[in-house]
């Protein structure tokens, strides 16, 4: 069953068409990678799903519910979380406070101005559990802007799962990392997204083939192929349009 359905999706900026009729279904629980050359429209597609941009045409449905005209925070509360190419955290708050902020709405705190959060034992215990899961328990008191880049990416992932998201969008999750950092990030992503649906944009084909159950190839705003990693690796159209022989050697 598709948790996310894109039908006839288009996005224009003036006369320039970036997304050109994308039809794609993402199955519940699958790990789906979207690959393609720079300028193919991958980040724009994420912006459309997460509500930053409104489609010019077509439909986006999450668990059968239309996301048309919903603002990003409403889409997030329905169960979709995303990361960005540039890390999106609260740099002056501690690592602990970043995770706790992500837990507030799903924990039922909403717009409450008179509660002292340090006294909320259950909330703070849940925050500690998320920090343990992402390997940052020892960094809890440090301002988020002062931890290493790879740790900031882990923190951002922790904020996504803390909010209770069923569908997680990761935009180049290992970009800028060393090989060892990337290996650790892949292990973390696999572990914390278990049982959830994952869509990722990634240029590192080794990471894509290691994580993805299914891959879609986006070229000039159109999906030219979608299938299991072995199918995509062997697809001559994909090799010609995207990475050439480098894809078959990845």
Image (cartoon, rainbow, N blue to C red):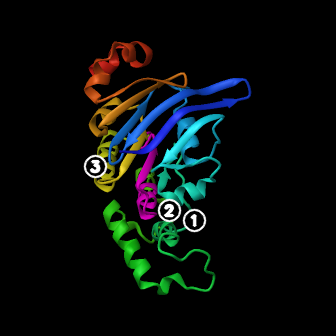
Q: CA distance from mark 2 to mark 3?
A: 22 Å
Q: Which residue is mark 3?
A: 187
At a point 50% along the width and 60% down the height, the residue shown is: 146
Is 187 situated above or below 100?
above
Report the magenta residues as a range: 154-175
Is 174 situated above or below 9?
below
Q: Between disc 3 and disc 1, whose residue precedes?
A: 1
Residue 210 seen: yes
* Magenta-colored stretch includes residue 164: yes
Residue at disc 3, secondary structure = helix
At a point 53% along the width and 41% down the height, the residue shown is: 46
Is 225 situated above or below 60?
above
| 195 left or right, relative to 52 | left
Q: Between disc 2 and disc 3, whose residue precedes?
A: 2
Whether the residues at callouts 1 and 2 have beta carbons within 8 Å, the answer is yes
Give the camera-side residue of 10 and 174.
Answer: 10
Q: Nearer the viewer, mark 3 or mark 1?
A: 3
Count of numbered badges drawn on the protein: 3
Residue at disc 1, secondary structure = loop
At a point 38% along the width and 46% down the height, the residue shown is: 198
Q: Which residue is mark 2?
A: 144
């Amino acid at each position: 069953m598709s948790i996310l359905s894109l039908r006839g999706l288009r996005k224009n900026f003036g006369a320039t068409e970036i997304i050109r009729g994308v039809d794609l279904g993402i199955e519940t629980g699958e790990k789906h990678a979207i690959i393609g050359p720079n300028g193919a429209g991958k980040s724009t597609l994420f912006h459309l799903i997460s509500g930053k941009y409104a489609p010019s045409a077509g439909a986006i449905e999450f668990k059968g519910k239309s996301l048309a005209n919903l603002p990003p925070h409403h889409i997030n509360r329905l169960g979709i979380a995303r990361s960005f190419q540039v890390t999106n955290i609260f740099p002056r708050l501690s690592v602990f406070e970043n995770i706790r902020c992500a837990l507030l709405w799903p924990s039922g705190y909403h717009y409450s101005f008179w509660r002292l959060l340090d006294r909320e034992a259950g909330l703070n215990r849940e925050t500690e559990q998320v920090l343990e899961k992402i390997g940052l328990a020892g960094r809890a008191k440090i301002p988020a802007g002062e931890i290493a880049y790879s740790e900031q990416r882990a923190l951002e992932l922790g904020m996504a799962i803390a909010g209770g998201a069923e569908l997680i969008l990761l935009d180049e999750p290992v970009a800028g990392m060393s090989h060892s950092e990337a290996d650790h990030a892949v292990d973390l992503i696999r572990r914390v997204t278990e049982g959830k649906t994952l869509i990722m944009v990634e240029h590192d084909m080794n990471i894509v083939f290691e994580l993805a159950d299914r891959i879609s190839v986006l070229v000039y705003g159109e999906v030219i192929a979608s299938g299991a990693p072995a199918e995509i690796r062997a697809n001559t159209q994909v090799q010609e349009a995207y990475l050439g022989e480098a894809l078959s050697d990845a």
